Image (spheres, rainbow, N blue to C red):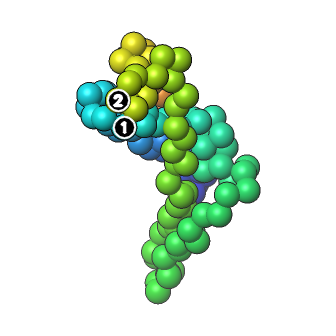
Amino acid sequence: MIDRIGKDFEFYQKALALRQQRQEILASNIANADTPNYKARDVDFNATLRDAMGEGGLPRLPDTSLTLTSARHIPASAHTSGPAEELYRVPTQPSLDGNTVEMDVERVQFADNTLRYQTDLQVLNGRIKSLLAAIQQ
C-alpha cells in the first residue's frame, strides 16, 4: 500500500525538483544580466520531465534499493534522474558585450515558473488531503 502511494507521488516529486532546478537557472540568468559574455540558459521542462519519468532515452544513474534484513522492514527504493540538460537561449536582441540575458524574458519565465511551482504544490496538497480524508473514513 505504501509503495502504491509512493509511486503516485513520484511524478509530483520529480516535477517539483525540476521546477526548483529551473528556478535556480533563471535566477542565475537574472543575477548575471550585467556580466559580459554570459549566455542565458534554460531547460526544456517537458522533455526533461519525460526523461526523468523514464520515457526518454537519456542515461540515468542506477536506482537504489534498501536491503531488507528483517521481515518487518518496509521496502524502499530511490529513483534518480540525471540533471536537466541546460540549453542556451537565443536572444532576440543581442547586446554588444556578448551577454544574452534579456531581463523582460527572464522575468516572465521566472514568474511563470514560480506560478507553476505553486500550482504543483497546491495540487499535491489536494491529493494529500484527499488521501487523509479517505484514510480517516
Which residue is at the front of the view, 136 or 84?
84
> Can you tell which mark lies on residue 97?
2
Q: Residue at x 36, y 18 (%)?
A: 103
Q: Quadrant of the N terminus?
A: bottom right
Which amino acid lies under the numbered mark 2 shown in the image of this protein? Asp
Q: Report x, y in % for residue 107.
A: 37, 17
Q: In screen coordinates, is 82 left or right of 128?
A: right
Q: Report x, y in % for residue 34.
A: 26, 28
Quarter residue 31 falls in: top left
Res. 127 visible in picture: no
Which amino acid lies under the numbered mark 1 shown in the image of this protein? Asn
Q: In screen coordinates, is 44 left or right of 120?
A: right
Q: Secondary structure at mark 1?
A: loop
Q: Residue at x 56, y 68 (%)?
A: 61
> Can you tell which mark lies on residue 126?
none
Q: Report x, y in % for residue 72.
A: 46, 76
Q: Residue at x 72, y 51 (%)?
A: 56
Q: Residue at x 73, y 56 (%)?
A: 57
Number of residues whose C-alpha sits closer than 10 Å to that of mark 2, classed few (under 14), some (14–19) or many (20 or more): few
